[in-house]
Amino acid sequence: MSTQEHVYFHAEHSVAEFAAVIGPAVGMAVIRGGRGETFLSRPLPDGGAVGGELRANELADPAEPSFLDVFPLVLDLGITIGDRGRQLAEARALFTELARVSPVPVALVRGYDYLLAAAGAGDRLVWFPENVTPYAEDREMWLPFQPVTQS
């Protein structure tokens, strides 16, 4: 189980290209790591920061299809203040902003376990009921909101 929240992007850009678009749109600085990683970060109003690494989504598994398989990029999101409840609140707030400005569909997942929300590019934001997973057992719930992948 992940202790971070995850924002998935249905973007066909490279990590660096997409970071340059989406980061400034929500007031996040784009930071390059020493090993070529790309991080997004912005300060929290009362100290600390919210952000994380934007990277390729390498978790797709054809043997176990999930809602997340069609999203090429993922932002591993956390806060520098050690409070999981606060982290989730900040993730929800940032995701709401991202959903408004993202040029591509986005999804918010708590850890890797629960699908919290999804929005298409220019579509309305949909919050899922509690305990909806991004996996096959909840496919009927999330399938209408999964972006279509062009072949």
Image (cartoon, helix red, strand yellow):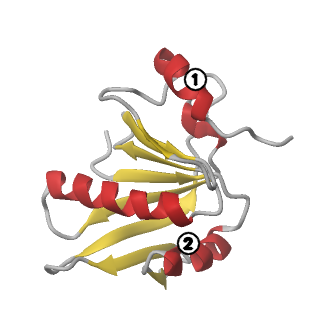
User: Judging from the image, what secondary structure is the residue with disc 1 in?
Assistant: loop
Packing grade of label 2 (10 A; few <14, some 14-19, many >=20) is some
Q: Is residue 60 visible?
A: no
Name the mark on residue 36.
none
Name the mark on residue 22.
2
Looking at marks 1 and 2 on the same chain, the residue that comes earlier in the sequence is marked by 2
Residue 32 placement (x, y as % from top left): 51, 83
Distance from disc 1 to disc 2, alpha carbons, whole Å, reads: 30 Å
Quadrant occupied by the N terminus: top left
- Answer with the quarter of the image where residue 91 lies: bottom left
- Answer with the quarter of the image where residue 53 lies: bottom left
Amino acid at circle 1: Glu
Which residue is painted at 30% across and 29% down in the image? Answer: 130
Q: Which residue is mark 1?
A: 64
Q: Nearer the viewer, residue 21 or 78?
A: 21
Residue 141 placement (x, y as % from top left): 49, 22
Q: Is residue 116 above or below residue 72?
A: above
Left/right of residue 50 with respect to residue 126 in the rendered view: left
Which residue is painted at 82% across and 43% down in the image? Answer: 150
Which residue is painted at 27% across and 49% down in the image? Answer: 3
Callout in the foreground (1, 2): 2
Which residue is painted at 63% across and 70% down in the image? Answer: 18
Residue 99 placement (x, y as % from top left): 50, 57
Amino acid at circle 2: Ile
Residue 94 placement (x, y as % from top left): 37, 63
